[in-house]
Image (spheres, rainbow, N blue to C red):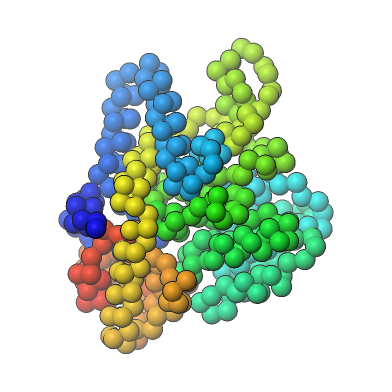
Amino acid sequence: MIDWSAFRAQFPVTASWAFLDHAAVSPLPTPAVAALRAYADNIAASGVTAVGKWVGRMAEVRALAARLINAADASDVFFVPNTTHGIGVVAEGFPWQAGDNVVLAAEEYPANQYPWMNLAQRGVEVRAVPSRGNRVSLDDLRAAMDARTRVLTASAVQFASGFRTDLDALGALCRERGVFFFVDAIQALGAFPIDVQRTPIDALAADSHKWLLGPEGAGFGYIRREWVERMHPIGVGAFSVEHPLAFSTIDFTMKPHAGRWEGGALNVGGLSAMGASIELLLTAGIENLERRVIALTDDLCAKAQARGWTVFSSRAAADKSGIVSLVHPTLAPEDVVKRCRAAGVAVNNRGGRVRVSPHAYNTEDEIDRFLAAS
């Protein structure tokens, strides 16, 4: 059993907000704040003489990130400043040929559309598959694929509808077709399990500022080892090579793993804070967090429907996520958001609907506060 009150005590935001907007930018828990301060204080006092300590800390964070997704080796994880960068590693580095295509859902977040659309000058077609209401159909994605499909890219959870993708089914489809499978994991990691050894995911990326409860500008990506040499590396710099500290020796021998995509200085403070948040989440247990988030969103849906709201999100068991998309019986979504902010409740407006996204530290009382405010 998890003591959710003790978990909740790690979140100072609860003193002033019923914060139900983790699909946007999450508040930092106390351990992440402490990690940021520790880095700032240490560098302020010691500058470069403290760097060794933080090199070691980055190794710890890399191991935590690898554990979170069950990567076979921590060196299959690389740090990114945002999800977009992680997507670009694949979009720009993939061995495309003119006439190839990439398949994605038409309702994907722009960061998982524009990098692929940017390949048009290289002769790569983007095939955007419309959702069927609140769901992305596996059959529709399959039908859009052909012999020239090279990549299927999907969000683990759709940002507007809250639809949770069956990654196992998509991964199996991609293996069957010989297609590279990329996952934008930002709306799932931290609340729902992703296992890259069980599920045939070839690459993924996520910033930490949503369900991972870390700062903006700090995240990580993953690339399956057999793809490293097949990708053209982008963002290459001094730290992409096997001997990065031999500054006076030019030896362009690339690291044989995902570390080659870390070309320059890292956001060490932000990544350290991300690591503190990942550790907090792992200690609680991702499966426990999943159950708690589902329980809270089930409670939200039942209470909202009783008040006349329409639940747009699919609440079929396999489709549920931490995002619930709602339609108010009379008010426009922007008016609901405004009322809620005035009452100290944080929700958002996405897809022309009210988006509510509680994390595991939230409470049923905060769900009630949201409904009372709106």
Left or right, 102 with reference to 264: right
**Which residue is located at x 59 percent, y 65 percent?**
169
Q: Nearer the viewer, residue 150 or 199?
A: 199
- 118 sits to left or right of 78: right
Compared with 274, 191 (above or below) is below
> Percent from the top left, x then y, of residue 93?
69, 44
Residue situated furthest top in the rendering: 248
Q: Is residue 342 left or right of residue 171?
A: left
Q: Position of residue 301 (x, y in %)?
A: 34, 78
User: Which of the 4 quarters of the picture holds residue 100?
Assistant: bottom right
Query: Which residue is at 72% across, 41% downward?
Result: 230
Picture coordinates of residue 119 (x, y %)? 72, 53
Given residues 41 and 320, the one toward you in this image is 320
- Quadrant (top left, top right, bottom left, bottom right) of the C terminus: bottom left
Above or below, comparing residue 369 to residue 147 in the picture: below
Q: Residue at x 29, y 31 (%)?
A: 38
Count of all numbered marks drawn on residues in the image: 0
- Res. 70 in view: yes
Q: Is residue 369 above or below residue 223?
A: below
Q: Residue at x 46, y 37 (%)?
A: 62
Q: Quadrant of the N terminus?
A: bottom left
Q: Is residue 336 visible?
A: no
**Residue 259, percent across and down?**
57, 33
